[in-house]
Amino acid sequence: MSAKDISSEVRNQGLALYKAAPEAMQAFQSVMKVVGKEGALPAKLKELMALAVAINVKCEGCIVFHVQNAIKHGATREEVVETITVSVEMGGGPATVYGGKALAAFDELKA
Amino acid sequence: MSAKDISSEVRNQGLALYKAAPEAMQAFQSVMKVVGKEGALPAKLKELMALAVAINVKCEGCIVFHVQNAIKHGATREEVVETITVSVEMGGGPATVYGGKALAAFDELKA
Amino acid sequence: MSAKDISSEVRNQGLALYKAAPEAMQAFQSVMKVVGKEGALPAKLKELMALAVAINVKCEGCIVFHVQNAIKHGATREEVVETITVSVEMGGGPATVYGGKALAAFDELKA
Amino acid sequence: MSAKDISSEVRNQGLALYKAAPEAMQAFQSVMKVVGKEGALPAKLKELMALAVAINVKCEGCIVFHVQNAIKHGATREEVVETITVSVEMGGGPATVYGGKALAAFDELKA
Amino acid sequence: MSAKDISSEVRNQGLALYKAAPEAMQAFQSVMKVVGKEGALPAKLKELMALAVAINVKCEGCIVFHVQNAIKHGATREEVVETITVSVEMGGGPATVYGGKALAAFDELKA
Amino acid sequence: MSAKDISSEVRNQGLALYKAAPEAMQAFQSVMKVVGKEGALPAKLKELMALAVAINVKCEGCIVFHVQNAIKHGATREEVVETITVSVEMGGGPATVYGGKALAAFDELKA
């Protein structure tokens, strides 16, 4: 499945969930909004942080979502790659597999 | 991959495992049988609980399996949706992704 | 460490976090408030669901927190025990260890 | 907390759980009994495998339990250490922390 | 997705990651090399151990990778099956799902 | 257990592991060295990233270790707090518990 297809699936299934549980999902989105703002840490770096977590918890939809957001905030390939190396330090072999998916998603979505 | 295809794969691969390790798998199925019975908690609610866990441990095959069982025990869309919101409270962003998959599985399997 | 001590630690550390990041934590608490309400599923059952997740993700502070909430909503020992058996079905050996902690927390906090 | 104290806690809390949910726990113990037998793989190696998993899923009670069983089946310090290195390959930094606990448990329980 | 396709994807994405972060990935590969050697435990058994971990942390790419390595080191179907039963003891329902994937990968790659 | 005590335990148990498996641990430390260098991302930010992962994978020893390193690289309380909010977005309730531990560790170690 391409990163674009995963991205669409996450968006569509998220939208359906939002319609089904508007109150809870709106509350969760307010968490995302607060966390995503520029603050003590730049928004770009918080997206890369979220990506490092996504790789380590092995959530492919989250990887694509946060790679996409990182690109929107101007993250470079080098920054994504370094984020993946932190993930490998923290997650060993499985992080090389999910880190590989993250890099492939970056290359596809950036193209 | 559709929920129906995931469901078939889980069933077929589970069957092959059962044939290969009958004693261990029979023992595990006796755990499932005991847990699945009506008891201090209704079977339907225990299936929804298992679904909440499946979402939080990010096991897509388990999500489809327990959505299916929840439907068999009469779980409504509203109950599945609330189960997903508990998962989001306990699992944040990744739980919105896997919760979205759970709702999509419900909608497909219920149709 | 007793369940009461864990409970105090979670509360105190949570409070400090709330003071340090009021906007983000308030947003997250609104998620908890929405999810915790009576709805398609009774609040008690949603607490037990959260407990099943807490056992499976091996978060001891969460186990104590949700055992406590389940007690407040009138959950019986039998219901907590059945919640633990669902956890064991979903999490094997580690869930017997963390399920054992959950039962000990119930017995201590209920006493 | 010493490995001996963790071991007692796991045993006592497991016993209480067994009394509270005899049917489910007996079924789970039959899984453990079948898996623990000599078979295509020696019992000692299956205990070390379980230890590698315990380290990677960060379950301290399980680490102590399986270190103890590995000792009973004659596992040497070198074998436990190699099991830890496999865990580090599969789990990175966190596995060095929980692997360190495993080695400390071996040294304490073997003494 | 077949085990062969997963295997190619893991290899290709791993290669791209290696090119992008040669220093970090080379360092990690030296971990893999040291761990993979014959030692206090035979290399075959360490691959099976890594497989048990892969099943329990639900990393499909890792499952295929370590099944493949286990085959190269001469692991039999019976040994893989017993490895899966240890995983089920340690991981319950989700391990039956990912264990089923492991057995299917073995049967496909061995054929 | 105080952050200082956890820190000593991690250091001592890590040292014992290093002595027992020098080749594998040296290889892993070379991963840590490469990842920890200033690069496309500042070392401080990579430590905070590792902290976000540590909170999400619920490794208390790792939390203390990376809080300590973040302090050494000049991370402020505000930066640690924002790192925790990213963790809460990615990990829900359990991340508030382990995030609370991270903040407490910062406050203790910085004092």
Image (cartoon, coloured by chain):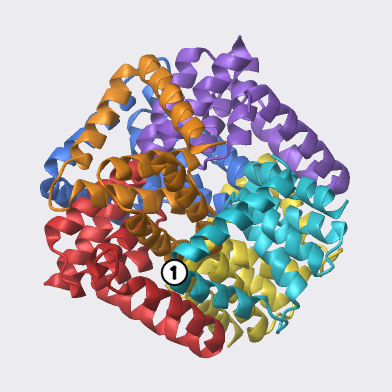
Chain colours: A cyan, B orange, C red, D blue, E purple, F yellow
Query: In which quarter of the view is residue C7 placed?
Result: bottom left
Left or right, B41 with reference to C96: left
Q: Residue furthest top?
A: E111
Using residue F36 as the reference point, say whether residue D10 is left or right of it: left
In which quadrant will I find the N terminus of chain D? Answer: bottom left
Residue type marked 1 = Gly
Question: Viewed as shown, does residue C46 lie left or right of A4?
Answer: left
Picture quarter with the C terminus of chain D: top left
Res D9 seen here: no
Position of F84 relative to D108 (above/below)? below
Q: Residue at x 46, y 52 (%)?
A: B103
Please indicate, yes or no, whether residue E53 appears anywhere in the rendered image. Answer: yes
Closest to the observer, D102 or A38: A38
Q: Position of residue A47 (x, y in %)?
A: 71, 67
User: Which chain does the numbered disc 1 sit on?
Assistant: F
For the residue pair D106 and D17, the one nearer the viewer reads as D17
Measuring 51% from the left and 54% from the top, which residue is drawn there? B100
Compare residues C71 and B51 and report the one nearer the observer: B51
- Residue nearer the viewer, A48 or C37: C37
Residue highlighted by disc 1: F93
Residue C34 in the image: state x and y as whole percent. 39, 75
Looking at the picture, how far across and down is residue F32, in whole percent? 73, 55
Element type at mark 1: helix
Extreme-front residue of the structure: B111
Please count the marks in the image: 1
Q: Residue at x 46, y 42 (%)?
A: B108
Q: Residue at coordinates 36% horizontally, 42% vertically from top-left?
A: B66
- Among the 4 quarters of the image, the one containing residue D36: top left
x, y percentage for residue C58?
40, 56
